[in-house]
Image: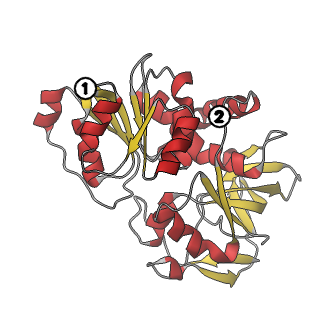
């Protein structure tokens, strides 16, 4: 089968198109013929060996796939952990889910990881209370575009989006954001407070780290929460207990991997997301589908914020 494999860490050029044997599923696993493989920002961290979990090389990246189960012929979306950038992938049966009729592969892929992330930012980590203001950074991206739309359903009052271009900010407004501002770190604290009608904000969903993290934390109201779920900038932060106490603020971390061995955290949330799509309450913003051989370019475009919505690889192209 055709697959993308990396034998060393580095830039997009380490993602090489190779021929490998079709993987054999272990006990409790299923084999999926891949129609689409999802890309996530975490894939770029795995490529540079800066991810939270460490990998062994050689590695076929890709943590989620949509396709057809070889044993049953059923259309499924699956969390495979790795191995997704290929024509075939194995995944735990417990993390393989039927795709409802009328839902396309790109939508299913967006919901199974980025949608679940957005859902848990509100319900599990942010614990948003009715009427609270919520800031969604990178609001035109995979997680952000879904988090903007989930705001009202999860009780948020004012939803404030950030994005890097006018077009992306316009998209966030069309998805239901009450305001959209430039997400650059300089002056961000002031822009967030202004967008919240002059008041500090209650919750921030933050995935950049570095100066954006610090500016977001400074914009929080007393008893506000900053939920961090990524470090896209690669810049770490130092938090001082005194500064948290002086502002009565909280910082909460979220890593989706901790949901994987807690089925209830996935099953309920995914069912809710699929139901919202069926009721046309939730729209997945689909981005580009790159041919498998262009995985390096796809990751580069994702890292440079040249993409919008859910980005996928097409192993048939």
Residue 120 visible: yes
Residue 24 lies, with reference to residue 169, above or below; the image says: below
Look at mark 1 in the image and give the residue it sits on: 221
Image location of residue 184, percent across then percent down: 33, 51
Residue 223: image quadrant is: top left
Name which residue lies at 17% across and 28% down: 247
SS at circle 1? strand
Image location of residue 173, percent across then percent down: 52, 36
Residue 235: image quadrant is: bottom left
Name which residue lies at 30% across and 38% down: 191
Tell me the mark number nearer the camera, choosing from 2 and 1.
Answer: 1
Tell me the quarter of the image containing the N terminus. bottom right
Tell me the quarter of the image containing the C terminus. bottom right
Image location of residue 27, percent across then percent down: 71, 57
Residue 6 lies, with reference to residue 88, above or below; the image says: below
Name which residue lies at 47% across and 49% down: 166
Pick the front one: 44 or 20: 44
Labels 2 and 1: the sequence-earlier one: 1
Look at mark 2 in the image and give the residue it sits on: 267
Pick the front one: 170 or 114: 170
SS at circle 2? helix
Pick the front one: 286 or 27: 286
Specify the color scheme.
secondary structure
Q: Residue furthest top?
A: 130
Residue 261 visible: no
Left or right of 212, for residue 104 = right
Left or right of 127, for residue 108 = right
Residue 309 lies, with reference to residue 250, above or below; the image says: below
């Amino acid at each position: 089968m055709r697959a993308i494999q990396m034998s060393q860490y580095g830039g997009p050029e380490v993602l090489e198109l190779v021929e490998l044997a079709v993987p054999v599923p272990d006990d409790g696993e299923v084999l999926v013929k891949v129609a689409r493989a999802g890309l996530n920002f975490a894939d770029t961290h795995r490529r540079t060996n800066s991810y939270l979990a460490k990998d062994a090389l050689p590695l076929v990246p890709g943590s989620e796939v949509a396709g057809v189960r070889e044993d049953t012929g059923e259309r499924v979306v699956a969390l495979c952990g790795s191995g997704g950038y290929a024509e075939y992938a194995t995944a735990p049966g417990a993390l393989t889910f039927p795709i409802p009729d009328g839902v396309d592969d790109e939508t299913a892929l967006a919901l199974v990881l980025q949608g679940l992330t957005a859902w848990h930012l509100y319900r599990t980590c942010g614990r948003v209370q009715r009427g609270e203001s919520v800031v969604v950074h990178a609001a035109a991206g995979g997680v952000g575009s879904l988090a903007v739309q989930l705001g009202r359903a999860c009780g948020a009052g004012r939803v404030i989006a950030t994005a890097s271009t006018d077009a992306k900010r316009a998209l966030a407004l069309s998805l239901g954001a009450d305001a959209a501002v430039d997400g650059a770190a300089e002056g961000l604290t002031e822009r967030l407070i202004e967008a919240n009608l002059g008041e500090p904000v209650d919750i921030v969903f933050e995935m950049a780290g570095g100066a954006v993290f610090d500016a977001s934390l400074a914009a929080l109201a007393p008893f506000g929460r900053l939920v961090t779920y990524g470090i896209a900038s690669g810049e770490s932060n130092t938090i001082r207990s005194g500064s948290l106490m002086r502002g009565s603020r909280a910082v909460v971390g979220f890593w989706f991997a901790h949901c994987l061995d807690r089925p209830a955290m996935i099953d309920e949330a995914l069912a809710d997301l699929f139901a919202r799509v069926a009721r046309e309450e939730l729209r997945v913003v689909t981005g580009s589908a790159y041919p498998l051989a262009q995985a390096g370019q796809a990751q580069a475009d994702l890292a440079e914020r040249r993409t919008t919505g859910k980005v996928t690889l097409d192993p048939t192209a």
